[in-house]
Amino acid sequence: MGEALSDLATAHLIALAGISILAGLIQGSLGFGFAIVSVPLLVLLDERLAPVPQILAALPLSILVWWRERAHTEVRAVVLMSLGRLPGTFLGHALLGVASAAVLDVTIGSLVLFAVVVLAVGRAVPRNPTTETVAGLLSGTAGYVSAISGPPIALLYKGAPGATARATISLILVVGSVITLSGRFMGGRFTELDLWLGAVALPSTLLGLWLSGFVKDRIEGRPMQLGILALCTLAGVALLGRAGTRMAAPPTPLDDATEVARSFDPIRRAARSTRSPIGRRVGGGLGSGRVRAAPSAPSRPARPVGP
């Protein structure tokens, strides 16, 4: 754990815990919103803090929210949106390979804001097999790319009762998070640091869920609709803002080989450690750009020739 978190500032870890409390409170009240609140703020502090740790921390949160409201779950919507998330995950993985993160943020953020405007001035989108499957597809793509997968689903539940929205959205997010994490793991976009950061954020996330129990019953009808639209607007603006930050920053492209190398690689970590025999021979040369040769075996004295 020390090696995994040692490069992160203590203040950033404290911020991770504090933001997770607020994000857990919001998701516990509305059924979604954890990543919308936490990811943009944490990325501004350190890009290593997001997005995978938020998916890890939000997974048990979504399970608990669903369990609390499970009697109001719409099973058909869960099945159709989950099926839609499967191709959405593959699409997100493919997009990360051909488009920059900034371009994807602009695209997803613009689509979310467009949907908010349409729903704010018109009627709610009807929930039927077609809209539910499309929402699942968009949610899977956005979730893989940015961890912000809630808006496409939540916009369908703009006019639904609070308990129905929280239960159904939460169960969809549970299934979707498992799909997204599996896709990232198989695609080499999952690191040991992500695991530790998710563990750091989890207690604060659960504290936020506990606090939501005092306010969730007051968010029904019009407040629920306004909350969904407000959070989706925040998501779109945050994605556009993050895109601007990424465009302004110096480019640091990471190809797939680099991402895989950052994943679980005990041999590489052992080579870096100066406490291991491998590290003493090889790791010492990594920082200076050269590899130290291992000591050669002593040569035997030549045998005399002749009688």
Image (spheres, rainbow, N blue to C red):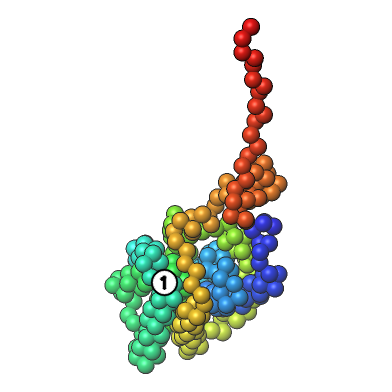
Q: Position of residue 155 (x, y in %)?
A: 40, 80
Q: Is residue 121 left or right of residue 35?
A: left
Figure check: 154 above or below 304: below
Residue at coordinates 57% horizontally, 77% vertically from top-left? 44
Could you say which quadrant of the image residue 15 lies in? Answer: bottom right
**Which quadrant would the N terminus be assigned to in this image?**
bottom right
Give the residue furthest to the bottom.
121
Q: Nearer the viewer, residue 206 or 70?
A: 206
Residue at coordinates 30% horizontally, 71% vertically from top-left? 129
Question: Circle 1 sits on which residue?
Answer: 100
Q: Is residue 80 left or right of residue 288?
A: left
Q: Nearer the viewer, residue 223 or 113?
A: 113
Residue at coordinates 44% horizontally, 61% vertically from top-left? 255
Give the residue furthest to the left.
130
Q: Is residue 270 left or right of residue 71?
A: right
Give the residue furthest to the top.
307
Q: Position of residue 93 (x, y in %)?
A: 39, 63
Figure check: 270 above or below 259: above
Figure check: 81 above or below 185: below
Q: Nearer the viewer, residue 54 or 289?
A: 289
Figure check: 273 above or below 6: above
Residue at coordinates 62% horizontally, 56% vertically from top-left? 287
Q: Would residue 102 be seen by someone viewing this image from the given angle?
A: yes
